[in-house]
Image (spheres, helix red, strand yellow):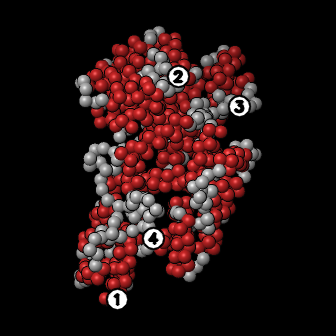
C-alpha cells in the first residue's frame, strides 16, 4: 500500500491481504494459466485483492518457483483491455507511470493528455520515482525524451514539473501571496500579450497550500477565477496543462473524478484513461474520488463503470473501485462537505459575464441598409452578405438598420428577409433582428400555440431571465399579441406547473444579498420532505425557488447540503416528477451556474441523431450579447470539445456559417 503522511487516513480502495502467502499465490496464478485456456476469474480475484507491494512479492516468488516472468505469462494468456488492466496492476506505481509516458511519446504523434494527467497530478516524491523508473526500464533520460517530443511553453512547463521541486512548506507568507497575485495579473490580464514565464514559475513551483490562497485572492482582486484568466490568455496544450495543474492544486481527487466521468460519458469509452486512473489511484485516493464523483455527477463511479464496461474487464474495474455509493441511496458525509466547500467558493465568485456579439466599431446604418437591399434585389439572394452584416452588429445597431432601411426604401426589412430566406437560416437571422424581449415573447407564444405545448421552451425562458428581462417580455407580449402573458400561461398550462410559471412570469424575484438565518430557515422548509403531501412540498419549493434572490438561494443550497447530505437538485429529482420537477431543476441549475445550464442545453440539442435546431437557435440568439462566451467556456470544460466544433459537426450551409459567427470563435 502507498506510504501515508503522518496522521493521514488511508483513502485507497485496495488493502494488504491478511495472511498473505506469496508462494501460494504464485502457485495459484501458475495453475490458473496452465494448460488450455486460463482461469481469468481466479487471476482477477487474486490480483485485485492484493496490494501492489504484495504483487511484487508474488512476481519474485513466481520467478523463483517456475523460472518464468509472471508479467510475460499474463501478457501471453490474457488479451485486450483486460490484459492491459491486469498487467498495469502488476507493475510498481512508478514503473506503471513510466510505461504510460513511454507509450505517450512513442511512435507517430504524442498523447498530450496522458503527459498532462501524470505530470500535473504527481507529488515531488512520485515524480522522482518516475524519473528513476524510466531510466531503469528504458535506459533513457525522461526529460530528454519529453523535450524531444514537445515544444514551446507546453514543453517548458512539463520540464518544470519533471524536476519535482514544488515547495512543500505549509507556512504561507501573506506578502508573497499578494505578490504572486499581482505578478499573475500583470502577466496576463494587464499585459498586451502574455508573460507565460510568470505563469510557469508560480504554478510550477509554489506549494499547494500557497497556491490555494493565491487563487482565492486572485478571485477577490480581479473578480474572476484563475481558470478564466488562463483560458483567456493561454492556448492549446499549454492551456490544458495549466488548467490541469490548477485543478490538481485545488483538489487532485476532483480532477480524477472529472477525468473518469469524461472517459465514460457519451459514445465509446476512453479505456486507456480509465485503466490508468483506476490503477494509479487505487491505493492513494480512490475513496475520495468516489465521494466527489457521487456528489458531482449524482451517480456512483461503480454504477457508471458497471453500465459502461463488460466481462472480466468490468469485474476487475469494479474490484478496484471498491464499492457502490448508490447502494445506500445517500452521499458520504465527507462528500457532502466537499460539495459545501464548492458552494462556498462559488458564493464569493464574481464571474464577469460576456457575450460574443459586440457593436461594430465603424458602424454605418446607411451603408448596411443599402448592402442588405442589394443582397436581396433581383434574382437569387446573397445569404453571405446578409449573414455577415447581421451577425456582426449588436441588436441595438440592427434596430437602427431596420429604421434606416424603411426610411430609404419604404420597405420592412423583416418582411423582405422573411421572403428571401428560408428554414433554419431564416429563423436565426429573423431572431437576431428582433429586440430581445420581443424575441422571447415570440418564443413563448410559439411554445403555447397549436396542438401541444413546448414545456421545455417555457421553462428555459422563464426560469433563466432576470426581473428586468421578465418585465420587458411581459410588455412585449402584451404589445405584440394583445393578451397578457399570464393569461396565455393560465389557458395553456395547469396545476402546480402553471402556478410556478405564473410566479416566475411576475418578475418579482428578490434582488438583495443573502440572509444566513433566513437561508437556514428556507433550507429547513424544503429539507422536510416527510411532512405534508406532495402538493404541500411543491408549494414550499415554489415559494422559495421562485421568489428568493439568486445570491440568497446559493446560500440556501449550501445550508441544505449541510442539513441533509443531499444536493437540492438530487432531492427534487427524487421527490417530484414531470414538468414540476423539470422547472425546479432548471431554476436550481440556473442559480448554481447559468452558463453551464445553457451549455448543457446546447449539447443536448446537438447530441445523437438529429439536431433540435429551434433550441439551438433560441439559445444562440438570446445569449449572444449576454453570456455566450461564458457558455462556450463551460461547454469545452464539461464536454471536452468546443461549442464551435459541436456546431460545425452538426449543422451545414449558411445556417452553419451564421451560427459560427454568433458563436464568436474556436476555443
Above or below residue 268? Residue 542 is above
At horizontal 35% and vertical 75% (from top left) the residue drawn is: 54
> Reading the chain from its start, which is encountered first: label 3 or label 4?
4
Q: Nearer the viewer, residue 515 or 301?
A: 515
- Asked if disc 1 and disc 4 are in contact, CB closer than 8 Å, the reply is no
* Residue 559, picture quadrant: top left
Q: Secondary structure under badge 2?
A: loop
* Residue 283, picture quadrant: bottom left
Instruction: Classify residue 390 as left or right of residue 83.
Output: right
Q: How far apart are the two marked residues, 3 and 2, measured between alpha carbons?
A: 35 Å
> Reading the chain from its start, which is encountered first: label 4 or label 2?
4
Tell me the crowding category of disc 2: few under 14, some 14 to 19, or many 20 or more residues within 10 angstroms, Cα based: few
What label does residue 516 carry, if any? none
Q: Secondary structure under badge 3?
A: loop
Above or below residue 297? Residue 614 is above
Which residue lies under the disc numbered 4?
93
At horizontal 39% and vertical 12% (from top left) the residue drawn is: 487
Q: Is residue 204 visible?
A: no
- Asked if disc 3 and disc 2 are in contact, CB closer than 8 Å, the reply is no
Q: How far apart are the two marked residues, 3 and 1, measured between alpha carbons?
A: 77 Å
Which residue lies under the disc numbered 1?
64
Residue 324, given in percent of the width and then of the height, sits at: 29, 53
- Asked if disc 4 and disc 2 are in contact, CB closer than 8 Å, the reply is no
What label does residue 360 carry, if any? 3
> Reading the chain from its start, which is encountered first: label 3 or label 2?
3
Which residue lies under the disc numbered 2?
512
Q: Nearer the viewer, residue 226 or 468?
A: 226
The quarter of the image holding the N terminus is: bottom left
Amino acid at each position: 500500500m502507498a506510504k501515508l503522511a503522518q496522521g493521514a487516513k488511508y483513502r485507497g480502495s485496495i488493502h494488504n491481504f491478511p495472511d498473505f502467502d506469496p508462494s501460494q499465490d504464485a502457485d495459484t496464478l501458475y495453475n490458473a494459466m496452465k494448460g488450455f485456456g486460463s482461469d481469468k476469474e481466479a487471476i482477477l480475484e487474486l490480483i485485485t485483492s492484493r496490494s501492489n507491494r504484495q504483487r511484487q512479492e508474488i512476481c519474485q516468488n513466481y520467478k523463483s518457483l517456475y523460472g518464468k516472468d509472471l508479467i510475460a505469462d499474463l501478457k501471453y494468456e490474457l488479451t485486450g483491455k483486460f490484459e492491459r488492466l491486469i498487467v498495469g496492476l502488476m507493475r510498481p506505481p512508478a514503473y506503471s507511470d513510466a510505461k504510460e509516458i513511454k507509450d505517450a511519446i512513442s511512435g507517430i504523434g504524442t498523447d498530450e493528455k496522458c503527459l498532462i494527467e501524470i505530470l500535473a497530478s504527481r507529488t515531488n516524491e512520485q515524480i522522482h520515482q518516475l524519473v528513476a523508473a524510466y531510466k531503469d526500464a528504458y535506459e533513457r533520460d525522461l526529460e530528454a525524451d519529453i523535450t524531444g517530443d514537445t515544444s514551446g511553453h507546453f514543453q517548458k512547463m512539463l520540464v518544470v514539473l519533471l524536476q519535482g521541486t514544488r515547495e512543500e512548506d505549509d507556512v504561507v507568507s501573506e506578502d508573497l501571496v499578494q505578490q504572486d497575485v499581482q505578478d499573475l495579473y500583470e502577466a496576463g490580464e494587464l499585459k498586451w500579450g502574455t508573460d507565460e514565464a510568470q505563469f510557469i514559475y508560480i504554478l510550477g513551483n509554489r506549494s499547494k497550500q500557497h497556491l490555494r490562497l493565491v487563487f482565492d485572492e486572485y478571485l477577490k482582486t480581479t473578480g474572476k477565477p484563475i481558470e478564466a484568466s488562463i483560458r483567456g490568455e493561454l492556448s492549446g496544450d499549454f492551456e490544458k496543462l495549466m488548467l490541469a495543474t490548477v485543478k490538481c492544486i485545488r483538489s487532485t481527487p476532483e480532477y480524477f473524478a472529472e477525468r473518469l466521468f469524461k472517459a465514460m460519458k457519451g459514445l465509446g469509452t476512453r479505456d486507456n484513461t480509465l485503466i490508468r486512473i483506476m490503477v494509479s489511484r487505487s491505493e492513494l485516493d480512490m475513496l475520495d474520488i468516489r465521494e466527489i464523483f457521487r456528489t458531482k455527477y449524482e451517480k456512483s463511479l461503480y454504477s457508471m463503470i458497471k453500465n459502461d464496461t463488460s466481462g472480466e474487464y468490468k469485474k476487475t474495474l469494479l474490484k478496484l473501485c471498491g464499492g457502490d455509493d448508490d447502494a445506500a441511496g445517500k452521499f458520504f458525509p465527507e462528500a457532502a462537505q466537499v460539495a459545501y466547500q464548492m458552494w462556498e467558493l462559488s458564493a464569493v465568485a464574481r464571474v464577469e459575464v460576456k457575450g460574443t456579439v459586440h457593436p461594430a466599431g465603424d458602424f454605418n446604418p446607411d451603408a448596411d441598409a443599402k448592402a442588405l437591399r442589394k443582397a436581396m434585389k433581383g434574382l437569387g439572394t446573397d445569404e453571405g452578405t446578409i449573414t455577415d452584416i447581421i451577425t456582426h452588429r449588436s441588436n441595438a445597431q440592427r434596430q437602427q438598420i431596420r429604421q434606416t432601411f424603411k426610411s430609404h426604401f419604404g420597405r420592412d426589412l423583416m418582411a423582405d428577409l422573411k421572403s428571401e430566406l428560408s428554414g433554419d437560416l431564416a429563423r436565426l437571422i429573423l431572431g437576431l433582428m428582433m429586440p430581445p424581449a420581443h424575441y422571447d415573447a415570440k418564443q413563448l407564444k410559439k411554445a403555447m400555440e397549436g396542438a401541444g405545448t413546448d414545456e421545455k421552451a417555457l421553462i428555459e425562458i422563464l426560469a433563466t431571465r432576470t426581473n428586468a428581462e421578465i418585465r420587458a417580455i411581459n410588455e412585449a407580449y402584451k404589445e405584440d399579441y394583445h393578451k397578457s402573458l399570464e393569461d396565455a400561461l393560465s389557458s395553456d398550462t395547469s396545476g402546480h406547473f402553471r402556478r410556478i410559471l405564473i410566479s416566475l412570469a411576475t418578475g418579482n424575484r428578490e434582488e438583495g444579498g443573502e440572509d444566513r438565518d433566513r437561508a437556514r430557515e428556507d433550507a429547513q422548509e424544503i429539507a422536510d420532505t416527510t411532512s405534508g403531501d406532495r402538493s404541500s412540498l411543491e408549494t414550499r419549493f415554489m415559494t422559495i425557488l421562485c421568489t428568493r434572490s439568486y445570491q440568497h438561494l446559493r446560500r440556501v443550497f449550501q445550508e441544505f447540503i449541510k442539513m441533509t447530505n443531499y444536493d437540492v437538485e438530487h432531492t427534487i429529482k427524487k421527490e417530484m416528477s414531470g414538468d414540476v420537477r423539470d422547472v425546479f431543476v432548471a431554476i436550481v441549475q440556473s442559480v448554481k451556474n447559468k452558463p453551464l445550464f445553457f451549455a448543457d442545453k446546447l449539447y443536448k440539442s446537438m447530441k445523437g441523431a438529429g439536431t433540435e435546431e429551434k433550441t439551438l437557435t433560441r439559445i444562440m440568439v438570446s445569449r449572444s450579447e449576454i453570456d455566450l462566451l461564458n457558455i462556450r467556456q463551460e461547454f469545452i470544460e464539461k464536454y471536452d470539445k468546443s461549442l464551435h466544433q459541436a456546431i460545425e459537426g452538426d449543422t451545414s450551409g449558411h445556417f452553419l456559417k451564421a451560427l459560427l459567427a454568433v458563436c464568436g470563435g474556436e476555443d
